[in-house]
Image (cartoon, rainbow, N blue to C red):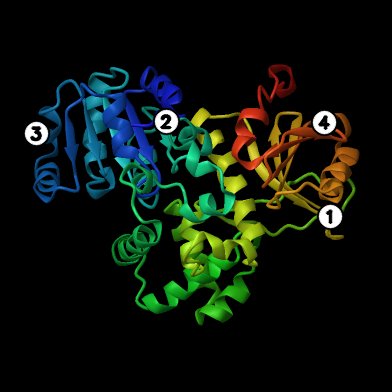
Amino acid sequence: MLQRACSPFLRKLASQFPVIVITGPRQAGKTTLARAQFPNHPYASLENLDTAARAEDDPRGFLASFPEGAVIDEIQRVPSLLSYLQQVVDENPRPGAFVLTGSRQFGLMGALAQSLAGRAGLLELLPFSVSELMPRYSGALIDLDAALWHGWYPPIFDRDLDPELWYSAYISTYLERDVRQVENIRDMAAFRRFLALCAGRTGQLVNLSAIADESGVSHNTIKSWLSVLEASYLVRLVQPFHRNFNKRVVKTPKLHFLDTGLAARLLGIREPSQLATHPARGALFESFVYAELLKRRLNEHAPWDIYFWRDQGGHEVDFVLESGRSLAAIEAKSGSTFHPDQNQGLSMFQELTGKELDRSLLVYGGKESFGYKGSSVLPWNAMEAGGLGDWPHTDSMQ
């Protein structure tokens, strides 16, 4: 098993809370992580119909069979169990006793807030990051197009699966199983079109009306479907940076797919060579950089938030990280060769923010690391190793 970057944070949660909840997309490695980090905990999966029936019919008896705690998989299958679990941990609040996993945020988070507020620590787990893969799969992280097409889900690496076949099955399973349980979607053909349209808009500003027109459904339906994708950890809507620095800024969020392999499959990209000239290559790369930043933030419980910045004149910085009074700006460029004009957005942002900007990074598709006019230029497969480092400094967060 690959060492997951979130393991130290997970152990910290287990030392503080009687219940740990690991959530994230399907097949991100939640069960593997839970069982590896808590090998002495008994294991029960509510995916098993008999186990789920026992937990639902006799919740007190079910929990009593685990007097020292347990790993309970797919807790959203029996959300009523959480109320009974509250009683158990209130009587014996031993840290790290129960570890719950769940694949969907819908319903689960509301039930947790109602039943286990103050009793549960939350870890959101996404697919592998570059830094997690590098020790064992460094060969897969040499060619950028192959890496973007391959994606980052653990089963593809662990079982050496064909990415195209795996993603096709993943999409079908997601459509036929999870979406129908979360949202009463009757026109699955329209939802498939919606998914493909969203993939084509990764890295772009969200235009709900345009997506609705092309999908053939209402504006409100698109808004609801987007919330399903967010709740399922397939996409994120990234908000614009709220400080305008005397500039008129856009207020529309950006859409980012959290896995480039999934987005590529939805776009009909069948092999890595197609990415070299594909019009979505730059946007996919930007979404890759966003996902890497988000993975680090979630894995380490990092004290910063991720935004983008764009003014009405079209000047833009792909990502702005904010922590207290400190800022970091990051630009994503998929080309393998650095050109000075690629740094224009960062240079302008440096002038606007002055001393508030602590770090300025340009992540690109090349292989060399170097500095340029106050920015660090970093290869895509080394952005974490040479990028944010110890940022933010403790004194900058005051």
What amino acid is at disc 3?
Gly
Query: Label 3, label 4: how many angstroms apart (C-alpha)?
Result: 56 Å
Residue that mark 2 sits on: 4
Which residue was labeled with disc 1? 315
Position of 151 relative to 304 (above/below) = below
Query: Pointer 4: residues within 10 angstroms few (<14), some, or many (20+)?
Result: some
Q: Nearer the viewer, residue 145 or 247?
A: 145
Nearest the camera: 372 or 181? 372
**Local secondary structure at mark 1:** loop
Quadrant containing the N terminus in the rendered view: top left
Asked if the residues shown at circle 3 and circle 1 are in contact, with their CB atoms under 8 angstroms apart, the answer is no
- In this rendering, would 45 be left or right of 214? left
* Above or below, 34 relative to 289: above
Give the residue drawn at x 44%, y 78%: 190
Q: Identify the amino acid type marked 4.
A: Glu
Kindly tell me whether residue 222 is visible in this rendering.
yes
- Which residue in the structure is indicated by mark 4? 356
Residue type highlighted by circle 1: His
Which residue bears the numbered disc 3? 61
Q: CA distance from mark 1 to mark 4?
A: 19 Å
